[in-house]
Image (cartoon, grey):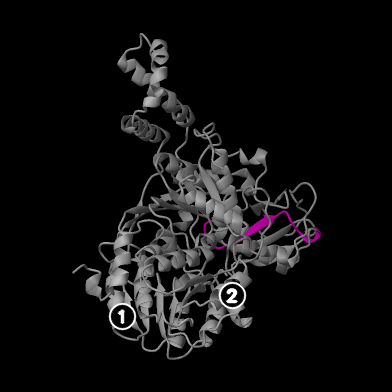
Amino acid sequence: MTKFEALGLQKSLLDAITDMGFETPSEVQEKAIPILLESETDLVALAQTGTGKTAAFGFPLIQKIDSNSRTTQGLILSPTRELCLQITKEMQAYSKYERNINVVAIYGGASITDQARQIKRGAQIIVATPGRMKDMISRRLVDISSIDYCILDEADEMLNMGFMEDIKDILSGTPDEKSTWLFSATMPREVATIAKKFMHSPQEITVGAKNSGASTVQHEYYVVGGRDRYPALKRLADTNPDIFAVIFCRTKRDTQKVAENLIEDGYNAGALHGDLSQNQRDLVMNSFRKRQIQMLVATDVAARGIDVDDITHVINYQLPDEIETYTHRSGRTGRAGKSGISMVLVTRGEQRKIRAIENKINQKFELKKVPSGMEICGIQLHHLANKIKDTETNSDVDPYLPEINEILEGIDREELIKKLISAEFTRFSNYYSKSKDLNSSDSGRDRERSDGRRGGEIPTSGAVRYFINVGEKDGYDWMSLKDFIRDTVGLGQEDVFKVDVKESFSFFNTESESTQQILEKFTEFKVDGRFVNVEVSKNPGGGGNRRSGGSGGGFRGKRSGGRRDDDRGGRGRRDGGGESKGRRRDRSESSSPNSGKRRSTKRKGDFF
């Protein structure tokens, strides 16, 4: 008897499992499948992304479906189109030996008429995103009033994306006597609310500690200056030549900017964010799955539902607002029992956030140093030597060998190896030979404080007064400017205060712990092509006759102009990555050693 057979699965499912090459059930499958098969019960299952949750609910659901009835009996809700399609594909593979079981995907961005037609032909199982499902229910194109099973997959992600009301409306139209199975990586307050309102004495299983990170993921953090995030990112990429990574940024603007910089510097990179059309998203994801893209730069919302095997690294270019989001990010690597690394770039002022995450996920972070230029050269040298050693010879080169041997005649073996290695190694050596130490230190921090652009030394305690080069002529009053600053930086409702708007410039206050974050955000920051500068005020009282410090025409800062540039607020403004070509080159390590290589083309609550 196989381990899957011991769980109580029927032969048709066991045959499908054999075809897919599954041999041993994962922990969540081992715990969930017997419970769901043996009784009609509600279930809350907490397990990390990549632990086999789809099979944990998919096998029992298929075994319990009445294939002789064409009515919809099972509804699976998932947060994104990508995950919806992935679940549908897996459910179809699981049920390949079942007769007459039809699984239909319902999601936005596709013809609602075609989807309605598929359901009308008979769909025992519907996999849907909440928005499209609610739309189809309101149009009476689907009937879920008599379903037997409802599954909420990645429940915390759905609720974090703002689907709470949609889910409540959908569940309110389902029968009370159905079984509800909730699968989630974490258990925030909103998930607990859904469980309490719509589930009856659910059984609970937990894989690992509640809200904890996966044990297969190693967590590292690097302390760098705010202006050194991108050079540090490049060094981490060069230190891991075979990197296959997802890089997370907080906003669409930063996502596009980092991806453009990586591509410009010769890396195989791509961006995934809410300003892309569905077709563009599909092209990027297909390239990533095929490894034509080595580094995918994404926002949290756009990355929901990414299911790509063998991701080696997750790099947090910026930390998210909420710890649960970090848990989801790190869960993109270390899947299916394989190991992975989650890296975090933080400034000195953000180190307290690392402690908060450690306490939440019950895992320790390792403080590591950003490698020096010479360390990277050594790593690249060994990588090249191993690559040459492991390369299989190709007989197609045989006709060219006599001519090549003639060219290389007189060069002995040792010199030939040295020349071959040097051809590649010299690029990195030239690039990194005069590179600076990127690891944040007291002296580095002092240099930032004495930066003339910043208006003098940065206070370390109490309230800080800032100057910003926009004002009434740009369409701002105190309220809209406060919203703009707060949403651009990602601060809380009360974090910006004492806003004083003048004709062409303004002043505002925050507590000192937000200073570094504010100054970093407004470094090389543009709105409608104009640089918006923020400095610590030399006149803490504000006012006075100080000139704007900005140049060249204003922009209209309407109330809506302060809307946050992330995937929750509609389409944000794009400015080609936030920098002009000329300014974007002004990075501390601006000409990458990879240049010249072929390039492929609701904030809720702050837990910190």
Q: In this view, does 412 lie above or below 189?
A: above
| Contact check, label 2 and label 1, Cβ < 8 Å | no
- 86 or 119: nearer the eye? 119
Disc 2 or 1, which lies upstream in sequence?
1
> Within 10 angstroms of label 2, few (less than 14), some, or many (20 or more) residues?
some
Q: Is residue 382 above or below residue 141?
A: above
Q: Residue 37 carries which label?
A: 1
**Which residues are drawn in magenta?**
460-473
The amino acid marked with disc number 1 is Leu
Measured as percent of width and height from the top left, residue 601 is found at 56, 42
Per the image, label 2 sits on a secondary structure element best described as helix
Q: Is residue 461 magenta?
A: yes
Measured as percent of width and height from the top left, residue 571 is found at 66, 61
Label 2: which residue? Answer: 116
- 253 or 480: nearer the eye? 253
Quarter location, residue 402: top left
Q: Nearer the viewer, mark 2 or mark 1?
A: 2
Any part of residue 207 in sight: no
- 477 or 573: nearer the eye? 573
Quarter location, residue 110: bottom right
Quarter location, residue 582: top right
Q: Is residue 218 left or right of residue 560?
A: left
User: Residue at image x 67%, y 66%?
Assistant: 482
User: Residue at image x 63%, y 72%?
Assistant: 113
Measured as percent of width and height from the top left, residue 229 is found at 51, 47
User: Residue at image x 53%, y 63%?
Assistant: 301
